[in-house]
Image (cartoon, helix red, strand yellow):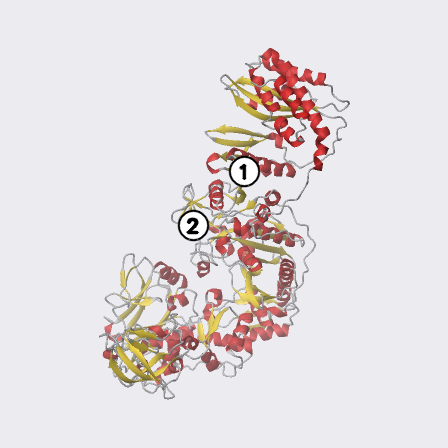
């Protein structure tokens, strides 16, 4: 919501703060300020030029050369392509060095052999939201060389308040007057009353109101006439001929030229003056009003009802909408004339010839307006306000304000009628001030609290009991319904900066989070082993969980494994490195949403078999340090994928396609037993080492040979390690490294030979040996 | 064919010729050395002779090992020198955490010092936990703030990728008793067009404190402590009024950094409606919640200019950051 600073001064005349200071105070006490800016700064170096001479361009039919005086006796030759320039006009001239709002930087140019020292500008080029292609024609009163921003009345600070952030305070703060009220409170200045006229007596309106839905709590119509001598000059208004002064010089229906200036600053398109007035009322009071051409209404009824599914509505800008059950519509006897609270229809829209208008000021159900506006993507200024609730009283305020403004311009009130309830019943809330102090954590006295609340126009009544008060919010504060909502008002007016920062938490010991701690330890240990952690996107090309609105259409599924994207990361990084160790930890989107880790090791100089084994070794080293008995890991291969088990439970896998290992950390951590670390005596006697090779038939795997050897040896054998595997025509041979030790003495060669013989003998008698 | 005898002979000749110990080691004892080859040949020996053969090879191996060990010292007389450094040997092979994990772990440590535990929750969430329980009903304008990625699960139930870590508040309230003092770090998702400051997946850290005393004043103390620890200096913090459906009152947190106020977190006193939705009805219980974006913090701390680098998995980016700080 953009608020011109002059408007705040208008309602809070004693305001002393500069726009920037004020923005800071609003930020600290009230709501978020997006920015403070001056629209004129974007028009630096754009000045009023007076066209003194126009000559045809010698080399181009479509171009002309204008001699333009820009003050202080200076004259510029400017080549121009627009058709609408005439001798004697005042026009905007972007001088050399100007940067226009569209980013165009003005430099001297040569156009078909003619030097041009600047540019004549259209409204659009000046950043004004007008439909225009030709040059903007300025009022003849404009002074040569004056900044165009001044002529257009754009030279003032605008405070832009973040509407999204307003939340429940939107009803109070989506208007000039609401913000002015807030400013008067937080700066301790008096707020001027909004100039209102009495509501007219209800008298015979040519139309009757019939409200057929509970979603419209209040509906009123004011009928005005006297617009007859007002006419748009269609020649002047046609595309490319836009005269700014038109709007400040209409004959009978003079609306305050400042109203047009403000609309221009807010970048609102200008229309028929009655429509412009309606728009201004919306910004000023926060109440959307709608203007119908009274003479285009058919029949003598205005009906408010809910639409039926499939009904067609043609909006005033010519777009067709198909309505749903329950959309609120305004109708005459023949059909829909407006989509209530959102946008008017084509059939009764105000146009050039409009002389009599009906002004609707009403209150509609916020949720219904919201769902309709969202569905039809019609987030108009009106819809944005209705969907956040508007106090019912504002409907009358808007009418009173319109009458006040139009009275000065000699319009006649032809009729007025209303139906429904225009009062807000705010809840009475009981607040214990002790609770407020405990909640805030500051010693704020009862009197101070009362002062803050009264400054907000909250009704305060002492109750029985020490510090209890009954509170009632004014009608414009629809958001004060709970004790805590009042506490917010007290705290912000007291000043968040005045609340002490005290770290007074009770003593508490933090509890472990096993899975998170496990992930952290593993990540940190892998980093010590020189692995780099990467993060990859969770979107993928196939899976079972499909996104309804994927951020990447080519990857509409959620991943159930980390390895493919880690593999992609490996490939992407191979350009820059000869050795890569990567891992990623993340939740996968399976039923349990378990935490996975994927890791990969790649050394250009080594075989991938060695690489992946190294990754496996590294990971088991990490697990060993965390307390896993790595001897309990085992492997089994199924269809080219190696499954990894711990304690017979599947905990991970190796998919050769991705050159990456993947483990389920959630499962692994559930299998971790508490570590019981005990010291074992360091052996006094040396070990004896032997390598043995065992040949077996080719259908026998390493695992079974290994476990056979293990079952044969005595407890003097403290280590069996696999070294090598080779095949000849008949057999596959496995070489193992064995180490023997006796804790009590040095083993002799003979004793170890006996152990080895035992292995060969037993294996021979078993089915293994061939 | 290689025999024990021929290897023995060659070895004796080599010793006589005084060849370097390191060369001897390579030639005889390495993985592809003569001894290994002799062991390999075991397969061609008839089973009854294998025992003897193995014993002989072992004996020879022992001889060579003994000799080499005895004479190794002599090699020290060779010139030992430290070769000049190739910077890439060090830089390219350093490990490192993603700056996000690094920061989250650091945040965990800071909060742990004042009694916070870590809580986690699912990334695939229900509407109930992500919105309804947090006082963001369907058809409420407040929902517009969160651009949601919706998921159709195979059972036809509409789910979503959590848009913030706040649902963990509800999960934790449902399963734990007062006092509650947690942080909940994790991934969150938004349906957004990405650019240098917007991502569809990023990380937040949620905080929740509920007991009988914690006030706005306590919150100011906690958040001042946290940012001062994180930035290793006494930080200037300010609270501004804001609006979130799940807190009342709500604040934005600004920190003073590089001569300006920077919005860094959202917070507030937990809304009674949210407490009730989490099963807490005792009117004497009160407290606060807060949340901030980890990427945003990382971008400030490390002066990262593009949020998309975080998920780029480009190790030229990651390996620059996350040094161990003393």
* In this view, A48 is above or below A126: below
Q: Are marks 1 and 2 in contact (CB under 8 Å)?
A: no
Residue found 62% across the figure and 55% down from its top: B210
| Numbered disc total | 2
Q: Residue furthest bottom?
A: A73
Label number found at residue B150: 2
- In the image, A307 versus A150, the foreground residue is A150
Give left or right: position of A238 versus B248: left
**Residue A64 visible (yes or no):** yes
User: Which chain letter matches label 2?
Assistant: B
| SS label for mark 2 | strand
Residue found 59% across the figure and 12% down from its top: B47
Instruction: Give percent across and percent down for residue A333.
Output: 24, 67
Give left or right: position of A577 versus B69: left
- In the image, A288 versus B282, the foreground residue is A288
Task: Kindly indicate the quadrant of the structure image that contains residue B1.
Answer: top right
Disc 1 target residue: A663
* In this view, A68 is above or below A343: below
Discs 1 and 2 carry the same chain letter: no
Instruction: Give percent across and percent down for residue A440.
Output: 62, 65
Q: Residue furthest front?
A: B17
Instruction: Give percent across and percent down for residue A404.
Output: 38, 82
Viewer-nearest of discs 1 and 2: 1
């Amino acid at each position: 919501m953009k608020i011109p600073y002059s408007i705040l001064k208008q309602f809070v005349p004693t305001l002393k703060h500069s726009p920037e200071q004020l923005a800071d105070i609003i930020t600290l006490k009230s709501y978020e300020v997006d920015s403070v800016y001056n629209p004129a700064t974007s028009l630096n170096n754009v000045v009023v030029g007076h066209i003194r001479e126009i000559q045809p361009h010698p080399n181009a039919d479509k171009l002309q050369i204008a001699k333009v005086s820009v003050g202080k006796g200076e004259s510029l030759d400017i080549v121009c392509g627009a058709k609408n320039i005439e001798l004697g006009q005042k026009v905007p001239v972007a001088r050399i060095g100007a940067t226009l709002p569209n980013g165009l930087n003005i430099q001297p140019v040569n156009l078909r052999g003619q030097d041009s020292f600047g540019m004549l500008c259209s409204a659009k080029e000046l950043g004004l939201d007008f439909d225009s292609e030709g040059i903007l024609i300025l009022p003849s009163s404009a002074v040569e060389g004056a900044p165009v921003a001044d002529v257009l009345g754009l030279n003032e600070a605008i405070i832009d308040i973040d509407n999204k952030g307003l939340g429940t305070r939107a009803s109070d703060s989506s208007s000039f007057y609401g913000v002015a009220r807030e400013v008067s409170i937080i700066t301790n200045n008096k707020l001027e009353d909004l100039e209102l006229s009495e509501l007219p007596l209800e008298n015979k309106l040519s139309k009757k109101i019939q409200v057929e839905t509970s979603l419209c709590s209040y509906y009123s119509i004011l009928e005005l006439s006297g617009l007859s001598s007002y006419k748009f000059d269609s020649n002047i208004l046609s595309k490319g001929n836009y005269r700014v002064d038109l709007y400040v010089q209409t004959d009978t229906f003079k609306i305050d030229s400042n109203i047009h200036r403000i609309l221009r600053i807010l970048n609102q398109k200008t229309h028929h003056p009655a429509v412009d007035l309606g728009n201004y009322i919306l910004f000023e009071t926060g109440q959307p009003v709608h203007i119908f051409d009274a003479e285009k209404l058919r029949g003598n009824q205005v009906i408010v009802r809910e639409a039926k599914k499939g009904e067609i509505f043609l909006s005033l800008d010519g777009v067709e909408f198909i309505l749903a059950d329950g959309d609120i519509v305004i109708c005459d006897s023949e059909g829909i004339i407006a989509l209530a609270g959102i946008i008017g229809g084509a059939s009764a829209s105000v146009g050039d010839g409009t002389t009599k208008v009906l002004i609707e000021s009403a209150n509609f159900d916020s949720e219904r307006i919201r769902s309709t506006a969202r569905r039809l993507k019609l987030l108009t200024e009106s819809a944005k306000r209705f969907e956040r609730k508007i106090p019912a009283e504002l409907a009358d305020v808007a009418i009173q304000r319109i009458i006040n403004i139009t009275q000065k311009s000699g319009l006649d009130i032809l009729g007025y009628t209303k139906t429904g309830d225009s009062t807000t019943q705010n809840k009475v809330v009981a607040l214990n001030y002790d609770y407020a102090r405990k909640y805030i954590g500051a010693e704020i006295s009862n009197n101070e609290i009362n002062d803050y609340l009264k400054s907000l126009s909250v009704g305060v009544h002492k109750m029985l009991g020490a510090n209890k008060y009954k509170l009632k919010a004014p009608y414009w504060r629809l958001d004060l319904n709970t004790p805590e909502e009042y506490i917010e008002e007290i705290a912000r007016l007291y000043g968040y900066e005045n609340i002490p920062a005290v770290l007074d938490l009770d003593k508490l010991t933090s509890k472990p989070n096993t899975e998170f701690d496990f992930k952290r330890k593993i990540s940190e240990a892998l980093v010590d082993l020189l692995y780099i952690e990467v993060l990859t996107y969770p979107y993928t090309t196939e899976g079972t969980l499909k996104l309804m609105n994927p951020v990447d259409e080519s990857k509409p599924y959620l991943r159930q494994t980390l390895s493919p994207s880690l593999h992609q990361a490996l490939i992407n990084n191979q350009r820059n490195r000869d050795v890569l160790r990567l891992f990623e930890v993340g939740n996968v989107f399976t039923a349990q949403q378990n935490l996975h880790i994927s890791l990969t090791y790649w050394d250009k100089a080594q075989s991938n078999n060695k690489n992946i084994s190294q990754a496996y070794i590294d990971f088991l080293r990490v697990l060993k340090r965390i307390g896993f008995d790595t001897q309990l890991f085992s492997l089994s291969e199924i269809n080219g994928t190696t499954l990894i088990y711990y304690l017979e439970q599947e905990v991970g896998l190796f998919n050769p396609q991705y050159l990456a290992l993947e483990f389920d950390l959630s499962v692994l951590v559930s299998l971790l037993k508490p570590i019981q670390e005990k010291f074992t005596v360091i052996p006094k006697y040396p070990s004896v080492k032997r390598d043995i090779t065992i040949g077996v038939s080719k259908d026998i795997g390493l695992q079974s040979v290994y476990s056979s050897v293990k079952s044969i040896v005595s407890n003097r054998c403290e280590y069996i390690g696999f070294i090598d595997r080779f095949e000849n025509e008949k057999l596959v041979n496995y070489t193992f490294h064995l180490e023997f030790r006796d804790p009590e003495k040095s083993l002799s060669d003979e004793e170890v030979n006996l152990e080895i013989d035992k292995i060969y003998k037993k294996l021979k008698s078993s089915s293994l040996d061939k | 064919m290689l025999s024990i005898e021929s290897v023995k002979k060659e070895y004796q000749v080599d010793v006589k010729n005084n060849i370097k110990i390191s060369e001897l080691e390579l030639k005889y004892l390495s993985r592809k050395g003569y001894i290994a080859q002799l062991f390999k040949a075991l397969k061609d020996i008839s089973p009854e002779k294998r025992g003897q053969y193995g014993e002989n090879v072992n004996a020879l191996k022992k001889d060579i090992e003994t000799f080499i060990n005895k004479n190794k010292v002599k090699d020290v007389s060779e010139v030992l020198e430290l070769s000049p450094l190739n910077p890439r040997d060090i830089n390219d092979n350093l490990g490192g955490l993603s700056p996000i994990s690094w920061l989250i772990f650091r945040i965990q440590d800071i909060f742990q010092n004042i009694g916070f535990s870590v809580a986690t929750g699912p990334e695939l969430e229900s509407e109930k936990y992500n919105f309804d329980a947090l006082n963001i009903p369907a058809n409420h304008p407040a929902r517009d703030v969160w651009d949601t990625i919706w998921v159709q699960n195979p059972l036809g139930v509409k789910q979503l990728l959590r848009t913030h870590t706040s649902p963990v508040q509800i999960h934790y309230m449902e399963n734990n008793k007062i006092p509650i003092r947690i942080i909940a770090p994790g991934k969150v998702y938004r349906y957004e067009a990405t650019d240098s400051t917007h991502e569809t997946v990023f990380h937040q850290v949620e905080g929740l404190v509920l007991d009988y005393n914690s006030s706005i004043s306590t919150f100011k103390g906690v958040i001042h402590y946290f940012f001062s620890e994180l930035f290793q200096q006494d930080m200037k913090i300010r609270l501004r009024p804001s609006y979130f459906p799940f807190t009342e009152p709500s604040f934005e947190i600004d920190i003073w950094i590089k001569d300006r106020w920077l919005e860094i977190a959202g917070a507030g006193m937990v809304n009674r409606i949210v407490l009730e939705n989490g099963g807490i009805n005792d009117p004497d219980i009160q407290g606060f919640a807060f949340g901030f974006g980890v990427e945003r913090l990382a971008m400030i701390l490390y002066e990262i200019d593009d949020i998309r680098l975080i998920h780029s998995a480009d190790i030229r980016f990651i390996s620059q950051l996350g040094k161990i700080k003393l």
